[in-house]
Image (cartoon, rainbow, N blue to C red):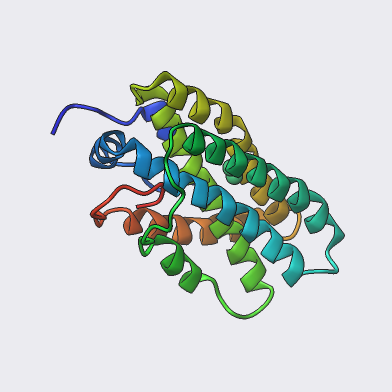
Amino acid sequence: MTAVQPDAAAARIRWLAAPSSAAWLEQALAHPELVLIDHAHCERKAAGAALQLMFRYPRDAELAALLSPLAREELEHFERVLALLQRHGITLRPLAAPPYGSELGKAVRRQEPERMLDSFLVAGLIEARSHERMALLARHSPDPELRQLYGDLLASEARHFGLYWLLCERRWPRPLLSERLEQLATLEASLLTVPHPEPRMHS
Ligand SMILES: [Fe+2]
Ligand SMILES: [Fe+2]
């Protein structure tokens, strides 16, 4: 193992219970193409998750007003990553997903309004982890084009988890939010401790 260490400041995000490991960063830097393909899928999934919430709660105008621009922005990110893949002759292909997304999905309670709360927090956690990892890639990727890409996307991803937090704060008291976030954040961090054979944005 080389001594590539995730940047402590980039990892210090209130949402996350633990920073990414040096092992993940090293694996990701060794397979930039795979990370890029997975990143494209993540952007598309982030747009899908926002749209899904809009369809699940069609009467909630505030939710729609906040999540519609988010979904659009995620699709713009998707197109940007896709264009980069095409310039480099890399095919966008399906990749086996690590258990991260499905395990977080299982933690979402089925009854309302808990389902809504957990959905917002899980979406925010995924955004926060993307942000943390893009910051690492923006700093450590040897390829300047990749540093630029990840650096450019950082600010939006930070806005995205801020937005999910805003949706929570307008609906639930802070102590209840903090308690549930802590539980889900602990789960989220634990899902990243089992190494995946190939690097993913969330593995
Ligand atoms: Fe994005
Ligand atoms: Fe995002």
Indicate whether 164 appears above or below 137.
below
Q: Is residue 138 left or right of residue 6?
A: right
Residue occupying image coordinates x 25% and y 57%: 194
In the image, what residue occupies the spot 47% across and 45% down?
A: 39
Instruction: Tell which of 16 and 100 is nearer to you.
Output: 100
Q: Quadrant of residue 96?
A: bottom left
Res 56 quadrant in image: bottom right
Q: Is residue 13 visible?
A: no
| Residue 184 point in image, percent of width and height | 47, 60
Q: Is residue 36 left or right of residue 121?
A: left
Furthest-bottom residue in this view: 111
Give the camera-side residue of 171 and 199: 199
State ligand 1's quadrant: top right
Q: Nearer the viewer, residue 27 or 113?
A: 27
Q: Position of residue 31 (x, y in %)?
A: 29, 39
Q: Is residue 142 left or right of residue 113?
A: left
Residue 25 is situated, as x and y percent measured from the top left of the image, at: 30, 36
Rendered view: 176 above or below 145 = below
The N terminus sits in image quarter = top left
Is residue 47 among what the camera can see? yes
Q: How many marks?
A: 0
Identify the residue shown where x is 76% and y is 54%.
Answer: 170
